[in-house]
Amino acid sequence: MSCPICAGKPEERVRPFCSKRCADIDLGRWMSGAYAVPSQDPEDAERASEEAEAATVAPGPARH
């Protein structure tokens, strides 16, 4: 098995990645929503749609 980010040789301390950098890149992709686990549950789709709508409708607090 190779590093899923760069195809390098995995290091045991950060397995399955080859480095902390590649592990951090992967984590960033999960955090940004670039990766997602598919769901067949209609409630999940409805909840996600509601959250997306709420995020675009309700702006955050003003920062000065």
Image: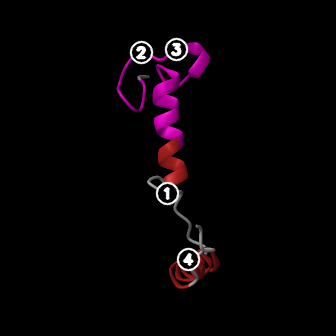
Secondary structure under tag 4 reads helix
Secondary structure under tag 1 reads loop
Q: Who comes first in sequence, dot 1 or dot 4?
A: 1
Viewer-proximal residue among 24 and 58 = 58
Q: What residue is drawn where x is 57% and y is 75%? A: 48
Q: Is residue 8 left or right of residue 17?
A: left
Q: Who comes first in sequence, dot 1 or dot 2?
A: 2
- Residue occupied by mark 4: 55
**Which one is closest to the eye, mark 1 or mark 3?**
1
The part of the image, by quadrant, that contains residue 45 is bottom right
- Residue occupied by mark 2: 9
Q: What's the CA distance linking mark 2 and mark 3? A: 7 Å
Among all residues in the image, which is located at the extreme front?
Answer: 64
Secondary structure under tag 2 reads loop
- Residue occupied by mark 3: 11
Q: What's the CA distance linking mark 1 and mark 4? A: 14 Å
- Residue occupied by mark 1: 33
Is the C-beta separation of discs 2 and 3 under 8 Å? yes
Q: Who comes first in sequence, dot 2 or dot 4?
A: 2
Amino acid on which disc 1 is placed = Gly
